[in-house]
Image (cartoon, rainbow, N blue to C red):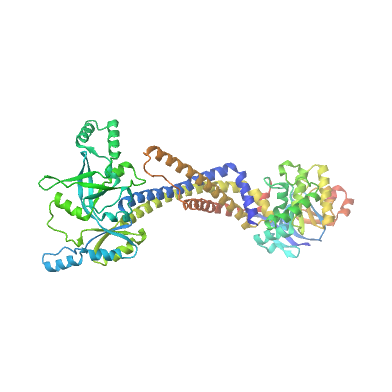
Amino acid sequence: MLRVEGLSHAFKNGNETTLVLQQIDFRVNKGDMVALLGSSGSGKSTLLNLMAGLMKPTEGSIYIADHNIVKMNENKLAEFRREHIGFIFQAYELIPNLTVRENIELPLVFQSTRPSIRKQKALKLLEQVGIPDKGEMFPSQLSGGQQQRVSIARSLITEPSVIFADEPTGNLDTKTEEEILAILKHLNKTMNTTFIIVTHEREVAQQTQHIITLRDGLLEKSQPAVEMDKLPVEEAVH
Amino acid sequence: MRVSDLTRLSWDQVRRRKVVTMLCAAGLSIGCAAIILAMSIGESTQKIVETQLTSYLKMDEITVMPDNGASAGPGSQSTASDEVKNRGKLSDQKVEIMRNIKHVKAVAAMQQLSYMQMTTSDDKQAYAEVIGTDLNSLEAFGNTYWQGSASDAPNSVVISYGTTLGLINEEEQNKLFDAMNLNPGDPALQEQYMTMMTTPSALYQKQIQLMNNDQDNKRKTSEALRVVGVLKKPKGVSDMQIANDRKIYVSIETANRLREQLMQSSGEETANDTYNQVTVKVDAEENVKQVEEQIKKLTLNTQSNLLQKESLEEQFAVFKSIAVGAGVFILIIASISIIVAMTMSTYQRRRQIGIMKVLGANLSQIRNMFIVEAALLGLLGGLLGVLFSYWIVWGINALILSMSTGEENMSIFIPLTAIPVGLAFAVMTGIISGIYPAVSASRTDALTAIKRD
């Protein structure tokens, strides 16, 4: 489903070159829920941006649904993202002047889907994320947890091949964090959607099936979450 | 992306950003209103001037004169000159041919005698232009009778409505003029003069006489003439203008007699079967040129008022171009405000643009959203401009009405073509001004835009 091969990325700052990712290789199967775990500066966000096609790597290939996204131009990538990639942001990133339902429908708007079909799908997803009565409200009228549920529903509306979640619980309290993770796990199971969750929290990563640990731009470990659970805290996250 | 979604998303921004929308729409509305007003004032003034021109100059009439050829040079043979004159005579035969030309409605000889003093039986006096013509043809030339009708009876005259105005006896006239000379600014005297000039006298079936001074300054008085018809008061012209249009129509025979009675012989008698001048009435203005060309083939000189109209149209075209140019200039200035406002808006919304790009919006979709937004601003400005121009025209008309005597039919109207033209200019200005911000928005780097510090 997702294949990362020999991926390296360097930032240039004047004459100085900083290598942020080095020779990363891993694969994620369809329906997997994978965590990219690492501390600040480990390169996990850069890796997420590269996999989402928001940046071009210095070296290597990224295959999503057998398409090498590294070779795609900006418009092709936009089209590809529209069809195959879903996004969940840490700060939800909902459009404030659109209603909750309109926010969820937005990716389908760019696909020119008929309004009636969009509405039907959005209402179904609102039910799945547990806020069926909030469709006509505006994001500012919702709590953080509810806004993240909207963001999850929006990421699912195009039925993408993979959903990237960037610190999805980073702005939430513990109780809401648990609720959101439960929703993600439920959706992963029921809809067989592939999730890649970027996090620096070991507890969040442990909710997934597989954990890829990054340290100083290198892939340190790639192991099932259950195995990590057995390690002491210091070793699990550097 | 569906057009309805594009419009909805763009309209949402227009509605939400009230201050930006208001500023942009205000600038555009002024430009749009300026264009509509320029076109309206241009068209209305042209129409008013044309109507007045038509009422005086008669656009559908051709004046035909004999073609005497170029003046003979000193060495030229007089017989050759006479031959040219004979060929160019305005004869009965040629008048008959003219009557049968396609699009000709009527042909009548018009002999302008001169301005002469007219005296009524109760000693009131005024000056009028005496014209000899076929009285029965007056109706064919667009005149209608208010009182009476044409008559073949000898010494019959038909007078224009203006001839009935401003009649006053000599003593009263001298008294009024003396008082006016002493107090030129006195409004009461001005009012008295205006009332005198616009008060009609009953002349129908009355007797009048014409007077003229000969070369020896001897006053000659004509035989008594009877007013058998008074023409209708023209519409859309003020009483003062009507009072200046004073005409007395007599038959050709009467005109010849009056010439003998009142004027010195010119020594060049007109033969009975030829005319000095003939007027041809054409069924429509657009056929005048064609008829004129055919008449010229009869070795006759023609004169119509088309040239005056064409020159008037040229002058108005220049005026309209200048006025529309001023409107376009205002729109260009307004477009700068749109560029600035929308560029700022692009900067403020770059995070939103970034999110949309991450969610799958491509370059053209982002660009189109901004262009539609600019077009909507243009449309809004245009609609406001239409509203403003109606208000301004209404104001101008109210001002004209309050300043006029109510006789003139002078008002500014908005031609139907001006509204789509004004709207199109406003929308086009919006779109053109929106191109740069739209392109700039579409080039926003999604990653930079969504990054939080």
**Spot occupied by residue B225 in the image (x, y as percentages of width and height):** 21, 47
**Spot occupied by residue B136 in the image (x, y as percentages of width and height):** 28, 55
Residue nearest the viewer, comparing A183 with B253: B253
Q: Check the picture and name the quadrant holding the N terminus of chain B.
A: bottom right
In the picture, measured across the screen, residue B100 lies left or right of residue A188, that is left
Whether residue B17 appears in this view of the structure is yes
> Residue drawn 28% across and 39% down?
B197
Tally the numbered discs. 0
Whether residue A216 appears in this view of the structure is no
> Residue drawn 17% across and 51% down?
B258
**Spot occupied by residue B14 in the image (x, y as percentages of width and height):** 60, 46
**Spot occupied by residue A123 in the image (x, y as percentages of width and height):** 76, 51
Q: Residue furthest right?
A: A230
In the picture, measured across the screen, residue B196 lies left or right of residue B26, that is left
Q: Is residue B224 above or below residue B140?
A: above
In the picture, measured across the screen, residue A162 lies left or right of residue B88, that is right
Residue nearest the viewer, comparing A80 with B215: B215
